[in-house]
Image (cartoon, rainbow, N blue to C red):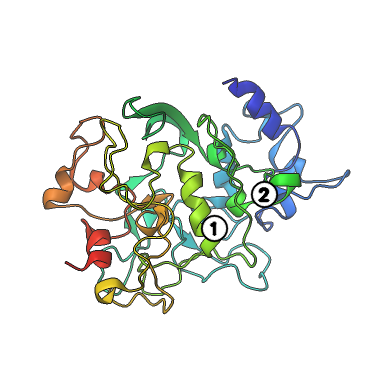
Amino acid sequence: MKKVWRWLGIFLLGGGLLLNGQPVWADNGPHGGYTATTDACAGCHRAHTAQGEQLLTAGSSTALCLTCHGASGTGADTDVLDGVYLQRDTTEESPPEGEVDRGLKAGGFQFARMDTAWVGSASPQPVTSSHLMDGQNGIAWGSGSIGSGPGISITLACISCHDPHGGAGGGNGPTYRLLRPTPWESGADVVILADENPKDYTIDAADGKYFGQEYEANLYHNLASWCATCHDRYLATAGSGHTSSGDAIYMYRHISIGSGCGCHNMHGGPPPTGNPEYRHDPLSCLTCHVAHGSSAHMGGFAAQVPWPNGSTTPNGDGRSALLRVDNRGTCELCHDK
């Protein structure tokens, strides 16, 4: 992949994040909808005095994103480092796009406000696992064809998954959370996620319980396909738990897309989540996992599960795998054994 040309294609088309406390909306304002005389380019780029590649005002693309979306940013209400929604830009959106001081649906990269212990309250806790977002290399577990090993090595930054210029959907339309139809380095098919209207960045449950989070049905289903653009062999339909995939590592797999048993609140369902519409049909990657980072804790057997390449490090809490509940609570809350 020729990264240089991809970066040029993204950043030199204009636009980006507005600094100095001005509001940020996904696929609106600074993230898209540019006119022939837009001022948005100047928010992120300098033609002759840039401090980063691709004429960025910051030293890297992730550093630039965090000037608005970081813990000390003032240009966006979504603090992705702390995993919380704040009212800190100059515009009060109508309708509101989230509940102030409530956890973001994706969790956070450094902290998360999650009730992973299922006790009915949440406070900011350091994350125990997260996706990479600062240009480091990692393994996309399950990427590649049947029998191709544990997964390929990829480099992840914010812009690997998100398009800061917006218009990533068909016909230059908006997408959910500015997600690209194909994440960089995945080499996968196109999966376009239509934007939601109205936008809602925070979880439903005020007590911090992430399990049982409601999503629009088509988005919920398509998000699983989008995750699988990198984690191909994790995508599994009903029956995959007793039908071999033919892969030596990912041989039998829990369903991650489509309808499950077709029942609602099977075996009595999980304890109250604050979401009266709880259901686990259809199932998706996001039934059990968050996208950015989780503060879940792992002990006992859950702390010793090997990675797909056979490695046993990191273990303990480092094996939390973006799960929404401590240990294997995500299993128990559906199966109620």
Q: Quadrant of the N terminus?
A: top right
Mark 2 surroundings within 10 Å by alpha-carbon count, few (fewer than 14), some (14 through 19), many (20 or more): many
Instruction: Out of 256 and 115, give the one closest to the viewer.
Output: 256
Residue picked out by circle 2? 19
Q: Is residue 3 above or below residue 140?
A: above
Location of residue 148 with respect to 273 vertically, above or below:
above
Q: Residue at x 76, y 29 (%)?
A: 47
Q: Which mark is residue 26?
A: none
Give the image location of residue 144, x and y in percent: 41, 29
Q: Amino acid at mark 1?
A: Leu
Question: What amino acid does circle 2 point to?
Answer: Leu
Badge 1: residue crowd in 10 Å (few <14, some 14–19, many ≥20): some
Residue 318 placement, left or right of 94 = left
Q: List x then y, in percent, for residue 20.
A: 67, 52
Q: Secondary structure at mark 2?
A: loop
- Which residue does the numbered mark 1 point to in the structure image? 219
- Residue lying farthest to the right in this orientation: 36
Q: How many marks overall?
A: 2
Residue pictured at 30% horizontal, 32% vertical: 246
**Residue 89 visible in the displayed image:** yes
Seen from the viewer's position, the closer of residues 269 and 30 is: 269
Q: Quadrant of the C terminus?
A: bottom left
| Spatial separation of the CA atoms under disc 2 and disc 1 | 31 Å
